[in-house]
Each structure stands twice: as structure tokens, then as C-alpha cells.
Image (cartoon, grey):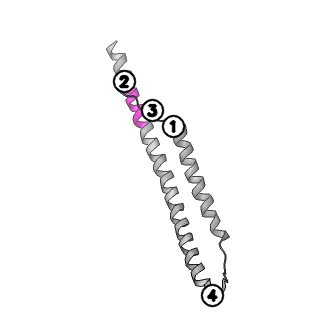
Amino acid sequence: MTELYIDQDSLATIVSTLATSSTELDATNNKTPDALDAGTVTPSVLAILSVLIDGAGQLVVGMAASSDAVADAAAKYKEQDDTTADAVIQQTWTAV
């Protein structure tokens, strides 16, 4: 039987990286220009900027949700792993 090993520290690093990246990207929202004058191409530049800002916002939400999902999955895995280990240990002791 193949052993499955999940490194809890690696999962914690993934959770932290996703959460930090989401927060840092969200903080760049304050750096968007209040006004923009690109002459005759202003409407085009604003349209591009709008798409970029919308995409960044979706990325912020996605990374935060992914961070939460990985944290939840790691906690559930650890809980089930501990429960299974306890059952195996108990079965081993009662069989002896």
C-alpha cells in the first residue's frame, strides 16, 4: 500500500503566501491614479486600466479564498490523520 504524506508546514507556507499576496495586491489599490489625461486615447487607457483593476480585484478575492480553502483542507486532513492514527494505535494495543 502506498503511503500518503502531507507536509503540514508546507501547507502552512502556502496558506501564508496566498494570504500575504492577496493583502499586498489589495494594498496597491491606493496607488491607482485619481485622474488620467492621456489626450485623445484617454478612453482607451481608462478601458485598459479598468480591465487591469478588475482582474487584480478578482485575483485578490481568489487568492484569499484559496488561502482559506487550503487552511480548511489542511485542518480537516490533520484531524482525520490524527483520528486514524489513534484508531490504529488503539487497535494495536488491544491486539497485543
Of marks 4 and 1, the one in the foreground? 4
Between marks 3 and 4 in the image, the one whose residue lies nearer the viewer: 4
Please give the range of residues in magenta.
Answer: 79-89
Q: Earlier in the sequence, mark 2 or mark 1?
A: 1
Which comes before the other along the chain, label 4 or label 1?
1
Q: CA distance from mark 2 to mark 1?
A: 21 Å
Could you say where residue 10 lies in the image, as x and y percent from the top left? 54, 39
The secondary structure type at the circle numbered 3 is loop
Q: Circle 1 is placed at which residue position?
A: 8
Q: Do residues under tags 2 and 4 come within 8 Å of each other at their CB atoms?
A: no
Q: Is residue 41 magenta?
A: no
Residue flagged by tag 1: what amino acid is it? Gln
Q: Which residue is mark 3?
A: 5
Q: Callout 3 environment at 10 Å: few (<14), some (14 to 19), or many (20+)?
A: few
Give the total number of marks visible in the rendering.
4
46 or 75: nearer the viewer: 46
95 sits left or right of 43 in the view: left
- Residue at figure coordinates x 66%, y 83% from the top left: 38
Question: Majority secondary structure of the magenta segment?
Answer: helix
Q: CA distance from mark 3 to mark 4?
A: 59 Å
Is 67 located above or below residue 78 in the figure? Answer: below
Mark sitting on residue 40: 4
Residue 88, disc: 2
